[in-house]
């Protein structure tokens, strides 16, 4: 087995074991994530990211989101980004987010720090910090196949509801593969596990196949 494949599978198993084993209610969702990226120069790019998240009617509202990003490479290892997101929750409160992000890479290692300011309809201003780490590596000699695995902690600094839960409110783990179909088009398939940590009630876990389509020009 390719060394990088072994590393990714091994990390995925470690991440799965590391997720707290709280009692939880499980559900199934399907997410789609088409994106379009336009390079402005060698170090700067604009990205338009969309998302569609489909849930059973008994499990919550379907979500449709769009993010506009500006990415800037600071070095070969560090990039910073700023973005704005609009999120429509079918039958629930809609949301706007302002996002700041720093991403790091070294060899196979990947890390990301994201800060979100959340503006939810009929709710107070909220803030959240998201910290993610993992690995990404080629799975084929031509590097057209890539594999990755990571884990992300959701840390709520200020809840959008008065008396709401702060601190650790979510853990997201995922493992997936991507395939370059051309110089401009990449598709991906990911298994994502979203664990919502809820105080004084049963946790909630979503099992999600995520289909990604990335077009760049």
Image: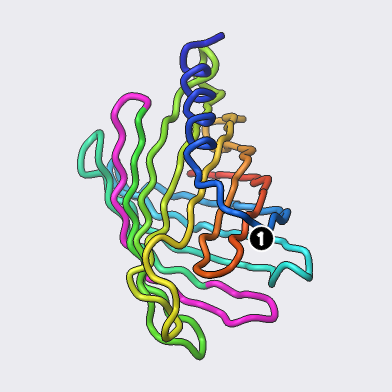
Residue 6: x and y, percent? 51, 17
Label 1 packing within 10 angstroms: few (<14), some (14-19), many (20+): some
Which stretch is magenta?
A: 87-108
* 53 vs 22: above or below: below
Residue 213: x and y, percent? 61, 44
The residue located at (50%, 44%) in the rendering is: 19
**In terms of secondary structure, what is the magenta stretch mainly?**
strand
Residue 39: x and y, percent? 38, 47
Outermost residue to the bottom = 122
The residue located at (64%, 81%) in the rendering is: 92
Relative side of 215 to 77, left or right: right
* 143 vs 195: above or below: above
Magenta residue check for 13? no
Q: Which residue carries the number 1 mark?
A: 53
Outermost residue to the right = 57
The residue located at (64%, 46%) in the rendering is: 210
- The picture quadrant where one finds residue 156 is bottom left
- The residue closer to the viewer here, 145 or 129, is 129
- The picture quadrant where one finds residue 160 is bottom left
Number of residue marks: 1
């Amino acid at each position: 087995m390719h060394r990088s494949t072994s590393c990714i599978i091994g990390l995925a198993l470690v991440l799965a074991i590391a997720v707290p084993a709280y009692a939880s209610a499980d559900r199934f969702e399907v997410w789609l994530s088409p994106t379009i990226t336009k390079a402005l120069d060698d170090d700067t790019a604009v990205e338009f990211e969309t998302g569609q998240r489909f849930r059973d009617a008994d499990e919550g509202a379907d979500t449709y989101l769009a993010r506009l990003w500006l990415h800037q490479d600071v070095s070969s290892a560090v990039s910073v980004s700023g973005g704005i997101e609009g999120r429509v929750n079918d039958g629930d409160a809609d949301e706007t987010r302002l996002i700041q992000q720093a991403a790091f890479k070294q060899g196979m290692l990947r890390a990301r720090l994201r800060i979100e300011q959340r503006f939810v309809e009929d709710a107070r201003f909220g803030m959240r910090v998201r910290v993610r780490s993992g690995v990404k590596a080629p799975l084929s000699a031509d590097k057209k196949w890539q594999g990755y695995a990571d884990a992300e902690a959701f840390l709520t600094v200020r809840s959008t509801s008065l008396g709401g839960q702060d601190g650790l409110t979510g853990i997201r783990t995922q493992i997936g593969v991507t395939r370059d179909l051309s110089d401009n088009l990449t598709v991906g398939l990911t298994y994502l596990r979203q664990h919502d940590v809820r105080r004084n009630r049963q946790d909630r876990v979503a099992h999600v196949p995520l289909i990604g389509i990335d077009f760049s020009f």
